[in-house]
Amino acid sequence: MSDRVLVVGAGLVGSLVALYLADRGHRVEIVERHGDPRDRFLTAGRSINLTLCERGFAALDRLGLGEEVRAITVPCYGRVMHGRDGALEAQPYGSRREAIYSVSRRELNRLLLTFALARPNVHCRFEQICLDVDLDRPAVLSKDLASGGVEWIEADRLIGTDGAYSRVRMALQNHRGHRFDLDLEHLDQAYKELRAPVAAVRAAGLDLNALHIWPRGHYMLIAFPNLDGSLTVALHLPYLGNPSHATIRTAADLEALFERDFPDALALLPNLEQEFFANPEASMVTVRCRPWRHHDRALVLGDAAHAIVPSYGQGANCGFEDCSVLADCLDQESTWADAFEAFEEARKPNADAIAQLALEHFQELRELVGDPDFLLRKEIERELNAAAPERFASLYHLVSFTTTPYSEARRRDAEQRGVVDRIVARITGVPREARSSAIAAAVRQVLAWEPQVSFETNLLDRRRHSAVPATLGKVEAHHD
């Protein structure tokens, strides 16, 4: 039976869920506060790059969109770490050409919304401010920014994909019939978006098939490659402290920060001063809440249900996986109420798991990627994976290169840490020049002595690429 479904928010998740619903015969109407992102003169909304990985592409492939999306991405086979002295260290993500894919949020949104609105049963109203939500009807009170007119838009079902500060979630929170739990936690820092133009990137000779990171303890710089050869750069700073957004008030303050901590990045950012002071601080927030649904009437998903910090690159991937799981629940259950309940029960533990993993990974990126003990553990993980790929996969691999549920990946990582701990204990005191052979021997012993340790990774078929960039393919380096 065809239902009228009102989707609040035409972002990445809203566009994709509209496609899944339309392909199941439902009539979908989307309301979006910004203008049409297909209009290339519009700049509203977030523009910082994001990364896609296996679980995101799995959701896109189900709709036949995977290759279309891959065409606008840049594969990144690892990280390049930049030291204060300009030294570079390549850290491949894996030994089997694994890659995450950098993509412009705006370009991805344009593509997905174009596909959604090509469906005859999908329509979108742009420049609509959601003033109120009635979960029981269900309906949204919408104000048209062009005309100033206000009206209630009704439907049979309501889907909230309206982001971390969701109006639909607020209605769930305020509804008298709900005992609503909400944990909204802001990170103690924000980022400023910058851009490294093509000419500057070429002059620096940077690898364009890698993420570039300048880790400096409690702050960092990170750069994502674009198809045109430029880099989208994010400067992460605390709100308070030194350095922080509070202490960078003048051009001289900004220049002193970069000369001290990011000297090799100065040449990449010819418009640093203008962009830093013109662009707003982008906050980062974790949202945990429950319930996500109101009977058979309304549901939130994506950031509206479980916003996470962007450090693991899983925000879009997790949201896309939401859409795929919701489609399965609709196919398997006989009522919308049962489908919504099954969806929440399936996704809530995994949303909580990736939220915590993202917070931990943010600390890892800022503070640990250059730490010798951390790099030693990564070397051991790589050796374990090479010796027994069917039994051992790192947490990063499980999250980024498989569709293993996040909660299961976290559980397996806890088990695997014990194995790594035992190997670290066996090689303590071994001279650095003999460490590689000692690690290999310890790995063989552990795998032989502990046959009960079995890590089934449920790997997807790996997508092969024609070649790994030389700067990452030839470096014997640590990886996540």
Image (cartoon, rainbow, N blue to C red):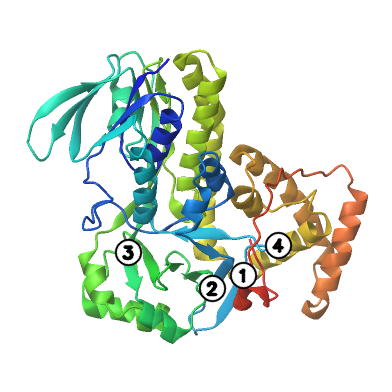
The kind of secondary structure element at disc 2 is strand
Give the crowd class for mark 3: few <14, some 14-19, many >=20 residues within 10 Å: many
Placement of 471 over or under 78, stated as above or below: below
Q: Secondary structure at mark 1?
A: strand
Give the residue number, with chain letter if any, for mark 4: 96
> Residue 326 placed where, x, y %?
50, 28
Q: Earlier in the sequence, mark 4 or mark 2?
A: 2
Badge 1 amino acid: Gln
Residues at marks 4 and 2 touching, judged by CB atoms closer than 8 Å: no
For badge 3, the amino acid type reads Glu
4 or 2: mark nearer the eye: 4
Q: What residue would you read off at disc 1?
A: 91
The residue under the point 87% across, 54% down is 446
Structural distance between the alpha carbons of marks 3 and 4: 32 Å
Marks 3/1 in contact by CB < 8 Å: the verdict is no
Q: Which mark is residue 81?
A: 2
- Residue 397 in percent (x, y) is at 65, 53
- For the N terminus, the image quarter is top left
Residue closer to the observer: 303 or 118: 118
Could you tell whether 161 is left or right of 333 in the image?
A: left
Q: CA distance from mark 1 to mark 2?
A: 8 Å
Estimate the spatial distance between the alpha carbons at disc 4 and disc 2, rounded to whole Å: 20 Å
Q: Amino acid at mark 2?
A: Met
State yes or no: discs 1 and 2 in contact (Cβ < 8 Å).
yes
Q: Earlier in the sequence, mark 3 or mark 1?
A: 1
Lower sequence index among marks 1 and 4: 1
Quadrant position of residue 442: bottom right
Q: Is residue 265 visible?
A: no
Q: CA distance from mark 3 to mark 1?
A: 24 Å
